[in-house]
Image (cartoon, rainbow, N blue to C red):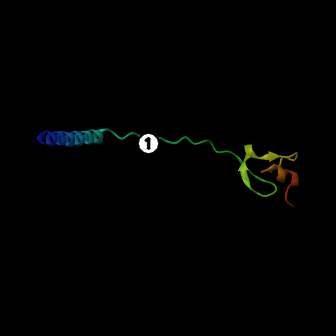
Amino acid sequence: MKYLLVIAVVAVFYLYWKKQRQSLRPPAPPSQPTLAPPQPMVACAHCGLHLPQRDALSDAQQQSYCCEAHRKLGPRP
């Protein structure tokens, strides 16, 4: 029984020592998330939905549309 008590006391001291050692370390600098650069946005000429320019469809007059159906319908009057 006394061996279990000695092992428990040693374990408590080890955990205390480990916690103290970790608190002495300087904190790691927070990592900055890498963000993609902003993309130019355009509005659909038919419904007005804003979307990235790279996802938009264009017609001969260089108007942007969100989908093929709106490109076929043309700009809203």
Query: Which quadrant is home to the C terminus?
Result: bottom right
| Quadrant housing the N terminus | top left
* 27 sits to left or right of 55: left
Instruction: Give the image location of residue 42, x and y in percent.
Output: 74, 50
Q: Residue at x 73, y 43 (%)?
A: 54
Q: Secondary structure at mark 1?
A: loop
Tell me where residue 69 appears, x and y as whole percent.
83, 52
Q: Which residue is mark 1?
A: 30
Q: Quadrant of residue 14?
A: top left
Furthest residue toward left: 2
| Residue at figure coordinates x 29%, y 40% from the top left | 22
The total number of labels drawn is 1
> Where residue 9 sits in the image (x, y, percent)?
16, 42
Q: Residues within 10 Å of mark 1 (few under 14, many from 20)?
A: few
**Taking 67 as reference, is 30 left or right?**
left
- What residue type is disc 1 on? Pro
Residue 64 vs residue 72, the one in the foreground: 72
Q: Residue at 79% across / 58% down in the picture?
A: 47
Outermost residue toward the bottom in this view: 77
Q: Is residue 3 placed above or below 72 in the rendered structure?
A: above
